Amino acid sequence: MFSPEGPSLRELAVQALSSVERGYDLLAPKFDHTPFRTPDAVLDAVGSALRRMGPFDAGLDLCCGTGAGVGVLERVCRESVTGVDFSAGMLDVARERVRPQGPRVSWVRADARALPFAPAFDLVVSFGAFGHFLPRELPGLFAQVRSVLRPGGAFAFPLVAPPRPGSLGYWTLLGFDTVMRVRNALWRPEFVMYYRAFRLGEVRRELEAAGWEVELQPLPEFGRRPDGSPRVRLVVARLPGQVLAAGMPLSRAGSSADRR
């Protein structure tokens, strides 16, 4: 993170003491050189899974940042791809770096909690952005996604299994979240970034409560944990009665072992 290409400690401190929007505007030119960007391995694995489900006509990358997920959508969408983010700085970088070769690409500045679209998309994806939403905001966020999908559309996002309690990863995430909560208790405006707040069980319950049917697809590229559960899953949500591209009803897709 502190390489010559990435942000300095001072730059990160200034970002962390800003609002979420202003913080990402400041970080945008160096964002792709930080651990906050979704790794290419995850993007490629999700792209492979989506190709098996598609193709799709129109795709939306929710909270697109500098456009890494838009590159995934370009591989699986035939007509158009849209990136939406509320940071103007991140969108400026995305416009410069993404060079579409297939479907037309557009960029929209907007809040994911108030999307300015009609039902125009067949696929909505998001990568690593959900830590910026409090648990109480998830029902509204999922309702917004539902409002922009055409009949038969899908909402898909990768979700990494939580680190084992007591592991270095566990304490790292716990420490980060604790620092952010202390910061937000002492400083305004808030900077919402809680990596431990978006958990599979709670997310699945919220999606199902909102009327979605949820399939969990293991991403085999990342293997399984010692207990046999996938290290990374692709969460795919559709409305009841809709089917996958291969013709399998969503309610029957996946084994019981993959739903843990």
Image (cartoon, grey):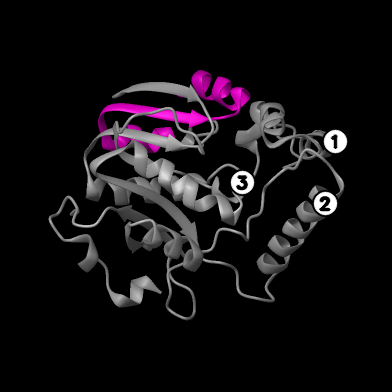
Residue at 60%, 28% in the rendered image: 87
Label 3 belongs to which residue? 132
- Residue range in magenta is 70-98
Of all residues shown, which one is farthest toward the left? 247
Please state which amino acid type lies under the numbered disc 2.
Ala
Q: Which mark's residue is nearer the viewer, 2 or 3?
A: 2
In the image, residue 71 above or below residue 166: above
Residue 113 pos. (x, y %): 51, 39
Q: What secondary structure is marked by label 3? A: helix
Mark linked to residue 76: none
Which quadrant: the C terminus? Answer: bottom left
**In this image, 21 relative to 75: left or right?**
right
Please state which amino acid type lies under the numbered disc 3.
His
Residue at 33%, 56% in the rendered image: 212
Label 2 belongs to which residue? 185
Label 1 belongs to which residue? 10
